[in-house]
Amino acid sequence: MARGPEAGLALLAEPEAEGSLDGYHLLPATRADLLRRAGRRGEAAVAYGRALDAVANEAERIFLRKRLEGCG
């Protein structure tokens, strides 16, 4: 956060490429949040959709849906 959303996205590139966190909803949720903060709402919506596909907790699902709706 200190260096901005683009720096955060760069840090996510390695775990995404490794695939070691595939299926873990917080990886695409984090990506979505950073994309949203960077103003890249279309890409954020796609990432929120991926997070929703993987999340099991209803409270988190509600939160992610609200964020997705905020992407337009």
Image: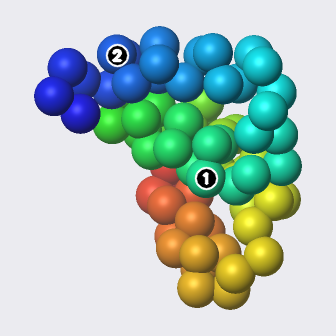
Q: Please give the residue where the numbered disc 1 appears in the rendered image.
A: 26
Q: CA distance from mark 2 to mark 1?
A: 18 Å
Q: Write the residue at 75% across / 16% down.
A: 17
Residue 68, compared with residue 28, is above or below; it is below
Residue 34 shows in the view: yes
Residue 16, compared with residue 57, is above or below; it is above
Q: Please give the residue where the numbered disc 2 appears in the rendered image.
A: 7
Earlier-in-chain disc, 2 versus 1:
2
Q: Amino acid at mark 1?
A: Leu
Decide if residue 12 is on the left or right side of residue 54: left
List x then y, in percent, for residue 57.
Answer: 70, 81
Decide if residue 8 is on the left or right side of residue 15: left
Q: Quadrant of residue 37 in the image? A: top left
Q: Quadrant of residue 42 in the image? A: top right
List x then y, in percent, for residue 43.
Answer: 60, 30
Disc 1 secondary structure class = helix
List x then y, in percent, for residue 32.
Answer: 54, 41
Q: Write the residue at 78% across / 76% down.
A: 56
Q: Write the residue at 24% across / 23% down.
A: 4
Residue 39 shows in the view: no
Disc 2 secondary structure class = helix
Residue 7, compared with residue 25, is above or below; it is above
Q: Amino acid at mark 2?
A: Ala
Q: Write the residue at 45% across / 44% down.
A: 33
Q: Residue furthest bottom?
A: 58
Q: Residues within 10 Å of mark 2 (few under 14, many from 20)?
A: few
Q: Residue furthest front?
A: 20
Decide if residue 65 is on the left or right side of residue 30: right
